[in-house]
Image (spheres, grey):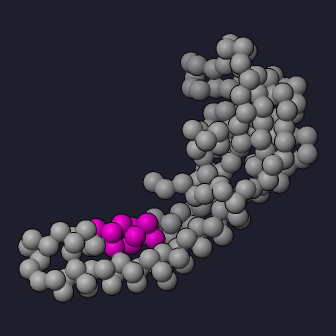
Amino acid sequence: MKLTQSDVEKIKEEIEHRKLVVRPEAIEAVKEARAQGDLSENFEYYAAKKDKNKNEGRIRYLERVLKTATIISDESADDEVGLNNTVQVYFEDDDETETFKIVSTMRGDSISGRISSDSPMGAALMGHKVGDRVEVKVNEKVSYYVVIKSIENTGEEETDTIRTF
């Protein structure tokens, strides 16, 4: 997985928060539910255990991501598409214009208009300039063309969050 240094910092912050805040709260919730007596019919106990295990799973997942990640730069030339740029593209086949923000894999969310630099569209746009006609290859048999209308270096926003799997 490709991450920027900023992605790494946000993941480390989430891990620390989960270990120092969420974990103790989850452990306490399990203790309180266990103290209520008969565990065989104690829904609160099972719910608390499930929440605790979900938190531990997320911590393990994020730690694995950090161990296996490739750190990439989010810097690009002012006139070229790069990470954290907002790009307006014209779809020739549909005669429509759409705007996307190019982000790292962990921040991709096509519903919010953030596409990964590893996606077919993101990979095709990277390094190109305004006016370039770019072929987006979906697979070996399917492709389409877009024209880059504008590039704005919007930088990373505080609202960009690490995607949960």
Is 42 situated left or right of 78 in this image? left
Q: Which residues are magenta?
A: 50-59
Is 23 situated left or right of 99 in this image? left
Q: Where in the figure is residue 6, as x and y percent of width and height?
A: 70, 64
Is residue 57 rendered magenta in the image?
A: yes
Residue at screen point 28% across, 73% down: 48
Residue at screen point 22% across, 72% down: 44
Q: Quadrant of residue 119?
A: top right
Q: 6 or 39: which is nearer to us? A: 39
Q: Where in the figure is residue 77, as x and y percent of width and height?
A: 90, 47
Q: Quadrant of the C terminus?
A: bottom left
Q: Quadrant of residue 157?
A: bottom right
Is 42 situated left or right of 109 in this image? left
Is 124 situated left or right of 105 in this image? right
Vertical placement of 135 versus 21: above or below? above
Q: Where in the figure is residue 98, as x and y percent of width and height?
A: 71, 28
Vertical placement of 18 versus 117: above or below? below
Q: Quadrant of the N terminus?
A: bottom right
Q: How many marks?
A: 0
